[in-house]
Image (spheres, grey):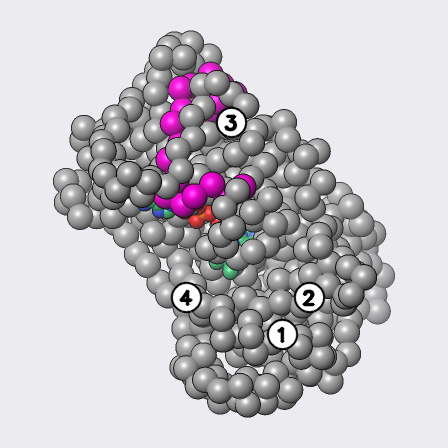
């Protein structure tokens, strides 16, 4: 294998950032026999009482689970999961309707605590003698020509430099390595950061007095209100983590003008009445918890020669509306591992091959996540989208091997790439919506007839896309 060729045991890999991606990467590279040093700026999440910094819980789906399988910890991770079988849609009157994620019953997403998952990954990584983890060490910059990283040690208040054979930065959306690429001006580095006009704030439903769930447990709850929305994901202790997505300055209510208790209550009373009833703690949460921005980061190249590499959010931060940021970051590790298996002889080829394989897919999920932002806020309530959704559910249920919606392709089909899921998924959406609008699709028709119609129209759109692309090239 590659490892033997390159002297796996002798290769020192420095990983910056022990979040979700970095901890899994350290575990996997440790399993492969590399010497791994993992540096994290925060205290140890397993012992320190700190918030994870990002969302408290997340939706874990099949791409992430595949990476857990690779690392041999699927069973341990499943113990931390709460299955969410669909979206529980809450309308403005407080009515609830469950919209399953898939017509196939075994397909669902999972709510998982960021802290517990990160802790498990650290525990597993630490079992390997060849993996060392250091906390309270913040990377300030990386000299990617010398393959060294400068750290600030918060415990001794000193600075030190570490070198390694390669440095991989998994230090999240504000990556220090990415900054060093950008400021270094030593090579052509493309970088874009797009902020949404919306930010988010985390709120909560506390458990009932006997530790139960205040609302239906096995769903991702959504209160979609066109230009803003509220969502809630369950936690093992009976609580829900609730997230408000709202514009910073547009609309009647926004983060800029929700400055008094009265106004916050008025807003929730008007739009999220049933949620408000579950939140006697609303005001405290609202004025204690930060409002944070949401953005998309794209950049290239991810690597500098065979010295340094960006992975996870550091390479491709996305907005959270497909629930795929962590899943994509875990899939990075799966793909990197596959490239290591290919037996390349040097790091530069490995990094290049990895980026070439991966970049198109992370660009695709970034764009899909923006699409879903609009779908979740509004379209889930719209009649024609509901018809489409019902048809797709019926197709998935009755023809489980022949049809998958865009959501299923992205979320439950870990064997196809994000890029392919995007092309096929968008073509299907376009085909169905056009045919529903033009009354070419009759939902009373035999389901098999509708399946054939959708398939034919999808192929036609895919073919047009191919022709258009060839023409451009
Ligand atoms: P991070 O998790 O950000 O980890 C980076 C680590 O590096 C942190 O531990 C940090 O302390 C450390 N670090 C940072 N800078 C330095 C430095 N200079 N030196 C040393 N250490 C450093 N994804 C999903 O799949 N499903 C979801 O449902 C979902 N929901 C989300 C909801 C919200 C509101 C947000 C904001 C994101 C959500 N995501 C979700 C995305 C997910 O959080 C990220 O994609 C994921 O955390 C990326 O992992 P990472 O390890 O690359 O980065």
Name the residue at 42% across, 9% down: 4
Q: Which numbered tag is attached to residue 293?
A: 4
Write the start and end of the magenta stretch as one range: 29-46
Secondary structure state at the residue bearing disc 3:
helix
Of badges 4 and 1, nearer the viewer stands: 1
Cβ–Cβ under 8 Å for marks 2 and 1: yes
Which of the two labelled residues, at mark 2 and mark 1, occupies the earlier sequence position? 2
Name the residue at 26% across, 29% down: 162
C-alpha gap between disc 3 and disc 1? 38 Å
Q: Which residue is mark 1?
A: 281
For disc 1, the neighbor class at 10 Å (few under 14, some 14 to 19, many from 20) is: few
Instruction: Answer above or below: position of 206 versus 125.
Output: below
Q: Which residue is mark 2?
A: 206
C-alpha gap between disc 2 and disc 1? 8 Å
C-alpha gap between disc 4 and disc 1? 23 Å
Which of the two labelled residues, at mark 3 and mark 2, occupies the earlier sequence position? 3
Q: Give residue 354's quadrant in the image.
A: top left
Cβ–Cβ under 8 Å for marks 3 and 1: no
Secondary structure state at the residue bearing disc 4:
strand
Q: Which residue is mark 3?
A: 126
Left or right position of 231 against 304: right
C-alpha gap between disc 3 and disc 2? 33 Å
Of badges 4 and 2, nearer the viewer stands: 2
């Amino acid at each position: 294998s590659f490892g033997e060729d390159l002297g796996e045991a002798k290769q020192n890999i420095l990983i910056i950032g022990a979040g979700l991606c970095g901890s899994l990467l350290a575990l996997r590279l440790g399993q492969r026999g590399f010497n791994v040093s993992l540096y994290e700026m925060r205290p140890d999440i397993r012992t320190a009482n700190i918030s994870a910094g990002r969302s408290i819980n997340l939706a874990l789906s099949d791409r992430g689970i595949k990476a857990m399988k690779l690392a041999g910890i699927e069973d341990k991770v499943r113990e931390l999961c709460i299955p969410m079988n669909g979206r529980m849609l809450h309308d403005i009157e407080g009515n609830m309707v469950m919209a399953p994620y898939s017509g196939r019953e075994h397909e669902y997403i999972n709510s998982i605590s960021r802290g517990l998952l990160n802790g498990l990954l650290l525990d597993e990584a630490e079992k390997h003698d060849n993996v060392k983890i250091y906390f309270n060490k913040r990377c300030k910059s990386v000299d990617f020509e010398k393959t060294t990283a400068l750290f600030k040690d918060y415990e001794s208040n000193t600075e030190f430099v570490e070198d390694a054979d390669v440095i991989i930065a998994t230090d999240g959306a504000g990556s220090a390595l990415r900054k060093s690429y950008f400021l270094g001006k030593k090579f052509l580095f493309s970088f874009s950061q797009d902020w949404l006009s919306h930010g988010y704030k985390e709120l909560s439903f506390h458990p009932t007095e006997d530790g139960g769930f205040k609302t239906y447990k096995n769903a991702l709850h959504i209160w979609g209100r066109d230009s803003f929305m509220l969502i809630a994901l369950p936690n093992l202790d009976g609580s829900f983590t609730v997230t408000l997505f709202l514009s910073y300055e547009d609309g009647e209510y926004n983060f800029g003008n929700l400055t008094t208790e009265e106004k916050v209550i008025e807003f929730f009373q008007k739009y999220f009445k049933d949620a408000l009833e579950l939140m006697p703690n609303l005001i405290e949460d609202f004025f204690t918890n930060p409002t944070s921005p949401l953005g998309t980061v794209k950049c290239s190249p991810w690597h500098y020669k065979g010295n340094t590499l960006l992975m996870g959010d550091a390479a491709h931060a996305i907005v959270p509306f497909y629930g795929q940021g962590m899943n994509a970051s875990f899939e990075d590790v799966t793909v990197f591992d596959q490239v290591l298996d290919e037996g390349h002889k040097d790091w530069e080829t490995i990094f290049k091959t990895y980026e070439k394989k991966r970049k198109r897919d992370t660009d695709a999920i970034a764009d899909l996540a923006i699409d879903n932002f609009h779908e979740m806020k509004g379209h889930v309530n719209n009649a024609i989208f509901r018809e489409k959704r019902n048809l797709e559910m019926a197709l998935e249920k009755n023809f489980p091997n022949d049809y998958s919606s865009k959501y299923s392709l992205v979320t439950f089909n870990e064997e196809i790439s994000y890029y392919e899921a995007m092309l096929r998924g968008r073509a299907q959406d376009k085909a169905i919506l056009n045919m529903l609008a033009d009354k070419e699709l009759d939902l009373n028709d035999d389901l098999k007839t509708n399946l054939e119609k959708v398939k034919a129209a999808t192929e036609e759109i895919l073919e047009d896309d191919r022709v258009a692309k060839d023409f451009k090239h």
